Amino acid sequence: MEVIRNIGDLKKWRQSCRANGQTVGFVPTMGALHEGHGALIARSAADHPQTVVSIFVNPTQFGPGEDLARYPRTLEADLGLSNSHGATMVFVPEVKDIYPPGSDSWVEVLGVGDHWCGASRPGHFRGVSTVVAKLFLLVEPVTAYFGQKDAQQAVLLGKMVNDLRFGLTMVICPTVRESDGLAMSSRNRYLNDWERGQAIGLFRALEEGALLVNRGETDAKKMERVMRAKLHEFAPQAEVDYLGFADRVTFQPQVLVATPCVVLGAIRLGKTRLIDNILMGEPRMGIVGLG
Ligand code: AMP
């Protein structure tokens, strides 16, 4: 497995893949890798002779007062995990490679990011779509792999790939969970034991919402109240950022819930913000953004 730290070397590496007729799969990450990332890497490695993992803590997707400075940086362990799941190259650019001094060009996807994480983190999705667009242009993958855990992000990026005709396929892989159901996340490292015990409340609340929908309940407000109660049963200290139901394509909130939909939530435990979701109804999220 190679480690490449600048764009010149990346371009040479990419050229040699092309010369050898090898397709490239791509897993963009912010590092602090866990088995959720591992599953994306393994999927890419099964599909392609070359798999690139990028590790870049993207400053433009963090708002003022968010956790950019303390975001976990664990490069040595990340290289080990990437290698053991089949990555053939890890790209670790510096901020100045991705944002040359004076850069002021942005990619913005309208609509999908209006609510939920987009509403609580202004500018977040603009940072995400911009960095992912830049990485796509640099790495030139045939396929890019993302996690369902960040479903709103995945759908927004799928729209970007379609709208801008990136000409690549996005594969969305299922959320990998701890044994109690907590979605794996780099931010779980922030949780102390007491917070970790409560963190499962988010998934339990989402499961409750899914159960109610499956029973035929349609009133989103009513279900949100039940979900809040379930959350606080497990996590009395949790602050709700949002809990609700969204359309699977537009991510507009559903007032009258109908499948297919996504039950989604974000909570704060201490200083840590956690998100999760459950997809309901067909089609499952699999491949989006055929460009
Ligand atoms: P991040 O490093 O948090 O920006 O995530 C990089 C990629 O890994 C994104 O596509 C995430 O959706 C995905 N990812 C993060 N956590 C999980 C998980 N628990 N299961 C599956 N994919 C995940």
Image (cartoon, grey):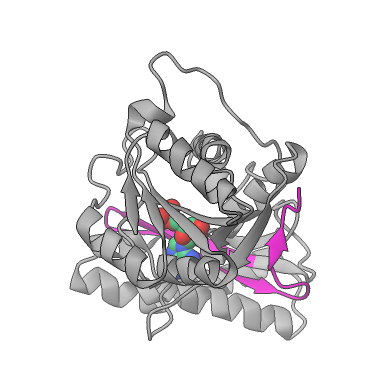
Residue 264 sits inside the magenta stretch: yes
Observer-nearest residue: 255 or 72? Answer: 72
Residue 195: image location, x then y, percent: 26, 69
Q: Residue at x 56, y 79 (%)?
A: 207
In this view, 164 is above or below 283: above
Residue 136: image location, x then y, percent: 57, 42
| Part of the protein shown in magenta | 263-291
Give the left or right position of residue 109, taking residue 187 as reference.
right
Locate residue 125: give its quadrant. top right
Q: Quadrant of the N terminus?
A: bottom left
Q: Residue at x 74, y 78 (%)?
A: 217
Residue 201: image location, x then y, percent: 41, 75
Residue 287 sits inside the magenta stretch: yes
Observer-nearest residue: 233 or 273? Answer: 273
Instruction: Residue lying at the far front in this picture: please name it.
Output: 19
Q: Residue at x 66, y 53 (%)?
A: 155
In this view, 196 is above or below 251: below
Query: How would you classify the magenta stretch by its main secondary structure?
Result: strand
Q: Residue at x 38, y 29 (%)?
A: 97
- Residue 25 at least partly seen: yes
Count of marks placed on residues:
0
Give the left or right position of residue 158, taking residue 138 as reference.
right
Observer-nearest residue: 202 or 53? Answer: 53
In this view, 288 is above or below 94: below
Locate residue 23: give its quadrant. bottom right
- Residue 74 at least partly seen: no
Observer-nearest residue: 40 or 122? Answer: 40
Give the left or right position of residue 138, taking residue 159 as reference.
left
